[in-house]
């Protein structure tokens, strides 16, 4: 366990540095039952596929971590092609006609959109994300963010959207988990053709039947040779893509001042109610602001999240820049990122059947054009992280060390390096009572900061009281928190409850 770089089949699997949500029930065992009961439960779970020691000395067979899925002979259909090619549409038609199913997407907004779509056609569907849970009576279908995929249930049909994200260094593990672990008779994978060779190699190991269906773009996409220049050139149906919340609101202000337009904004970290309300507006499900040609709100300013499959009526994509800060450094956008975002322009059957794409600045045009004319690089590795159960059982083989000592040590050995800030979070979380018992690791990395972790230590002592009375934030008043951080704490309480 000195390294989690698994060298099985040409490094198909490479560990990601974020955790797995499969351990929710185990966390609750820690919190509300004895540690011995939890250990017995884990022991029973693992013994079905072999001895504990064998499970932990050989991490090169991650497909064996999901015996329920291995019991099935799954039929896997890969729907691959560029954006706006109808690949997800065809997969969802199969999901609609199934007796039971699950949709796994990379965004809460996508999960929300699919849940609403299924419910609209009289297919009851639950919505489950890290921040929201909406249950529908009689539902046999679920629309979830991929981290929330239930690998303990049986499904007739499953859809995993944007499967090329299996190679993502931060979230790839969750797509690998869904691919290997979802027990469905029919599994539909939608994404970029660059993922096909890797997925085929992985599914050779699982023994699943694989079929690949290729799609062509349904509407033309035209890269423009001139930049936007002035904001006075903004027109109805434009979408300006920015890469920070600060820049999004700055652009909105400038466009409304100089371009005589009203803007809607959408980005990933909007509070759930605001984000959903904005997206409902954008989709035209309520009083439409963006999609309705008669509305005053005719321009969108959004983050790169729109590249992950959101269905919006966009005439022209305008890149505010072709560089972004990825959490570690400012870098050029990759070919897949540019193609995904640019491809949102022009939508078959909409008011804008022809899409255009350009940049704010002329200096960014060469990278835009070269990327659109280049194939996406073939994926070579998939993210992977051993399940919480596996890491806990490994710790039982080494009683000299506590579980969280082993956890911190393992995370620090991942092939993807950690920033100093992330290391501090891990160490702080390892001594944090709520983090120990309730919080999945990817929340620690993606959503939390040290101030929130300190507040969670306070929350720990009040969680039992939440059953009887509402929590009042005055308990945290000695720690300065922004409203955004308060919302993150509330989101964590929702996840803990789930």
Image (cartoon, rainbow, N blue to C red):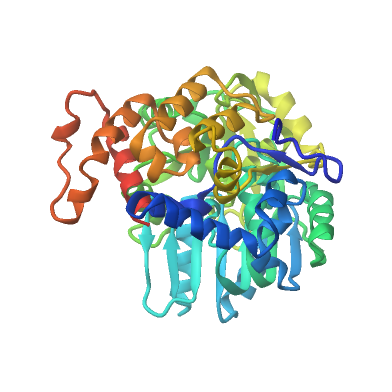
Q: Find residue 213 and report its image quarter.
A: bottom right
Residue found 13% across the figure and 33% down from its top? 474
Where residue 459 appears, x then y in whole percent? 25, 38
User: In the figure, residue 264 lies in which quadrant?
Assistant: top left
Query: Measured along the vertical axis of the image, is residue 107 above or below residue 421?
Result: below
Q: Is residue 441 left or right of residue 479?
A: right
Q: Quadrant of the N terminus?
A: top right
Task: Give how far across and how far down residue 172 sits, in percent.
Answer: 64, 43
Residue at x-position 69% and y-position 29%: 415
Viewer can see residue 405: yes
- Residue 114 in the image: above or below residue 81: below
Q: Nearer the viewer, residue 367 or 92?
A: 92
Q: Is residue 496 left or right of residue 93?
A: left
- Front residue of this view, candidates 399 and 167: 399
Please state the horizontal and vertical placement of residue 440, each as a whole percent of the image: 46, 44
**Badge count:** 0
Which image quarter is the C terminus in?
Answer: bottom left
Res. 162 visible in picture: no
Point 49% across, 67% down: residue: 142
- In the rendered structure, the answer to whether residue 493 lies left or right of residue 245 reads left
Q: At which x and y percent is residue 479?
A: 23, 24
Along the viewing direction, whichever of 26 and 24 lies nearer the viewer? 26
């Amino acid at each position: 366990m000195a390294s989690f770089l698994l060298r099985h089949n040409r490094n198909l699997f490479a560990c990601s540095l974020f955790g797995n949500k499969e351990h929710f029930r185990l966390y609750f065992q820690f919190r509300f039952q004895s540690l011995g009961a939890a250990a017995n439960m884990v022991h029973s779970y693992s013994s079905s596929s072999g001895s504990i020691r064998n499970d932990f000395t050989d991490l090169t067979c991650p497909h064996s971590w999901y015996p329920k899925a291995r019991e099935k002979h799954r039929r896997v259909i890969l729907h691959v092609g560029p954006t706006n090619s109808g690949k997800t549409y065809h997969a969802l038609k199969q999901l609609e006609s199934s007796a039971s199913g699950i949709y796994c997407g990379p965004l809460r907004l996508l999960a929300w959109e699919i849940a609403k779509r299924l419910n609209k056609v009289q297919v009851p569907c639950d919505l489950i994300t890290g921040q929201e849970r909406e249950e529908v009576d009689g539902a046999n279908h679920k629309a979830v963010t991929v981290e929330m995929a239930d690998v303990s249930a049986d499904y007739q049909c499953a859809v995993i959207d944007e499967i090329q994200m299996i190679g993502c260094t931060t979230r790839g593990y969750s797509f690998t988990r869904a691919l290997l672990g979802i027990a469905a008779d029919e599994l539909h994978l939608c994404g970029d053709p660059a993922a096909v060779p890797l997925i085929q190699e992985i599914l050779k190991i699982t023994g699943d039947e694989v079929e690949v269906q290729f799609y062509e773009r349904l509407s033309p996409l035209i890269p423009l040779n001139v930049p936007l220049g002035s904001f006075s050139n903004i027109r109805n149906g434009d979408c300006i893509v920015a890469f920070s919340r600060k820049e999004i609101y700055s652009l909105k202000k400038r466009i409304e001042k100089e371009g005589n337009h009203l803007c809607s904004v959408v980005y990933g970290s909007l509070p759930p109610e605001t984000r959903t309300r904005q997206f409902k507006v954008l989709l035209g499900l309520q009083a439409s602001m963006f999609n309705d040609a008669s509305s005053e709100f005719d321009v969108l300013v959004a983050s790169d999240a729109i590249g992950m499959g959101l269905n919006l009526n966009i005439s022209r994509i305008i890149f505010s820049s072709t560089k972004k800060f990825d959490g570690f450094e400012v870098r050029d956008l990759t070919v897949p990122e540019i193609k995904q975002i640019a491809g949102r322009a022009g939508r078959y059957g909409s008011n804008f059947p022809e899409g255009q794409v350009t940049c704010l600045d002329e200096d960014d045009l060469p990278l835009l054009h070269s990327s659109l004319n280049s194939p996406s690089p073939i994926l070579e590795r998939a993210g992977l992280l051993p399940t919480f159960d596996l890491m806990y059982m490994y710790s039982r083989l080494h009683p000299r060390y506590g579980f969280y000592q082993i956890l911190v040590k393992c995370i620090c050995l991942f092939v993807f390096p950690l920033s100093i800030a992330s290391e501090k979070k891990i160490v702080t979380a390892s001594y944090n009572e709520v983090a120990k018992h309730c919080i999945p690791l990817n929340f620690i990395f993606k959503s939390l900061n040290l101030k929130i972790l300190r507040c969670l230590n306070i929350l720990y002592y009040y969680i039992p009281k939440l059953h009887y009375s509402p929590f009042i934030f005055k308990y945290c008043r000695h720690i300065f928190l922004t409203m955004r951080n308060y919302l993150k704490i509330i989101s964590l309480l929702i996840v803990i409850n789930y």
